[in-house]
Image (tube, coloured by chain):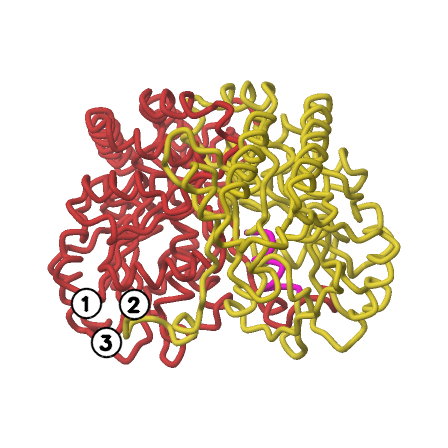
Chain colours: A yellow, B red
Amino acid sequence: MSRFWNPKIRELEPYVPGEQPKMDNLVKLNTNENPFGPSPRVLQAISAETNEQLRLYPDPEGVQLKKTIADYHGVQPSEVFLGNGSDEVLAHIFQSLFQPDQPLLFPSISYSFYPVYCRLYGLTTETLDLDDDFAIRPEDYQRPNGGVILPNPNAPTGRFLGLKDIRRIVEANPETVVVIDEAYVDFGGESSIPMVKEYPNLVVVQTLSKSRSLAGLRVGFAIANEALIEGLERVKNSFNSYPMDRLALAGAIASFEDEDYFQRCRQSVIGQRDKVTEGLESLGFEVVPSAANFVFTRHPDHSGAELARQLRERSIIVRHFNKPRIDNHLRITIGNSNQNQALLDALEDILKQG
Amino acid sequence: MSRFWNPKIRELEPYVPGEQPKMDNLVKLNTNENPFGPSPRVLQAISAETNEQLRLYPDPEGVQLKKTIADYHGVQPSEVFLGNGSDEVLAHIFQSLFQPDQPLLFPSISYSFYPVYCRLYGLTTETLDLDDDFAIRPEDYQRPNGGVILPNPNAPTGRFLGLKDIRRIVEANPETVVVIDEAYVDFGGESSIPMVKEYPNLVVVQTLSKSRSLAGLRVGFAIANEALIEGLERVKNSFNSYPMDRLALAGAIASFEDEDYFQRCRQSVIGQRDKVTEGLESLGFEVVPSAANFVFTRHPDHSGAELARQLRERSIIVRHFNKPRIDNHLRITIGNSNQNQALLDALEDILKQG
């Protein structure tokens, strides 16, 4: 605390990301990274841009990447907004598109960065409980609000909400903006992007960090109708003219140009998820049905915190949230087959001992 | 305009960066980029990081880069804050360290992003005139304020304010934060960083975009006492956990490890600036004494807008600001010797015809 801090800053409770430990031989299943590296074409594109031109500013508008994403998703470039990771995209959305006079609605169990943004930008919130199966109840999202935001699939549960239900929520809120945060959608969900054409109040956010294996490059985007995108651009251009560096722009473009690789990685993660789910269930774990690259799971007879601790002793890191209702759960990223097997073996061993 | 925009967003007037035109054979002297590419060691370091590890998030704290910068500048890592370009660093400073109950003070002629940040974060401003030679008058910065920010050297004038005067301003404002924005300091100024140890209210901001030829990589930093840095970290961690990508972190570290290259480029730009100044003066231009990688100049008999237009016809782009008191001036980036000669030849030709 310092007397020089702006009064608002004193009230912040910053987000704490999953740790990035510097241990060797770690089985790192805590931050939902992809077990596969990015497409070789991404690496080539970055290499081709690693030259003396780095002395020049990047394109502040990211025109080429916007066009690439627009073509890929069947929208117009003017319907695409770019950011330095989808966290930055979300920050700009919270600042520009949610109304401060009514509470922002989101699930009580969801991405824990949402309440952090609300404090940063002075938004009030109303969180809505999930049902007993951790499913979002669309009928809850029909009360006065300054906006709605949902991860879909939800985090950290992995549950996917069908597009019929998304449509119902969007239609119930014609006067406020509904944001669908699709960080994990490529692992078995279905995107709401095609609905953007129908609804002027719908924003869909995606990231290249998960399904495109580019967490280290920091690229995210939003798709929405042009007027909403223009609002986001106003904030972006009042914050940082050049949020995307030259290498990130080049790598991101190349990622969309290697559809084969994308499909293969994504299918492989989905296949591995099925195996991990089976393995966990055979050890007595309950696993929430997942459409993401992680599973959310608990064992009826074992504390989540204790399991996480014992896994850590075996150099396997998973994510445990010390929060009501989910403090016995673990969120486990789907790794490669060796990592997943190491996880299952370790859990088997721990359960035997306990 | 959209009914979905947050009311505050409607009042924004975003910053407009110098254009990044896609013309061939352009002599681009409009955005103060370095004529030299980054150090070969920077390119090697980026190449070494261009691998499958891009699937992993970067270090959210940027520990290694903070340590590198701290060692280089003789401070502690806890006194270093990193951002996605110094524009992001400045944005976080405006949000966290300036007080909203009194006006922020800055020169009436300075970096035109400052008033944009003030609108974004609801700060009032009081701008203070420069003297007839475009020098900042330190005695003006002794009035009630919510903070002070100065570019040093100033932009777009290029004038450097001596450290005695900086010290005077910092000491006159013990209750508010004074920010010295040193984007151009390596081209002939002297940094205020050593004074950070003496003053708990002093923040110094630098960028790798200019003197380290890395505008395309987006890396900036602030140095200040630990309590101020902690305030900035709180905002950063409420906005985006991972603002610096893996390649930017690696490239930035390498840049500080090639001191020879840095010194050579910087001296070469300074030498070229002297030649450009001489050339302009021999054509009858008035040139403000510059400690930056640009000159700020006017011709007593020619309109600045018209000169910029005619240079553009010859594929030479310089920056012209359509603002009171400086609308007859041009801000011309120092290029390489060929570019500078092309500029002087073009101006000579234009003056002959006019």
The local crowd at label 2, few if under 14, some if 14 to 19, many if 20 or more residues have their Cα within 10 Å, is many
Residue on which the image places disc 2: B148
Q: Are marks 3 and 2 in contact (CB under 8 Å)?
A: no
Q: Is residue B317 left or right of residue B290?
A: right
Quick one: label 1 or label 3, which is nearer the N terminus?
1
Question: Nearer the viewer's eye, disc 1 or disc 3?
Answer: 3
Q: Are marks 1 and 2 in contact (CB under 8 Å)?
A: yes
State how far apart marks 1 and 3 are (Cα): 12 Å
Mark 3 — on which chain does it sit?
Answer: B
Q: Decide which of B264, B64 is in the foreground and name it.
A: B64
Mark 2 — on which chain does it sit?
Answer: B
Picture disc at residue B169? 1
Q: Secondary structure at mark 3?
A: loop
Q: Secondary structure at mark 1?
A: helix
Which amino acid type is shown beneath numbered disc 1? Answer: Ile
Q: Is residue A160 left or right of residue B111?
A: right
On the image, which quarter does residue A21 sit in? top left
Residue on which the image places disc 3: B175
On the image, which quarter does residue A266 sit in? top right
State how far apart marks 3 and 2 are (Cα): 11 Å
Q: Which residues are magenta?
A: A88-97
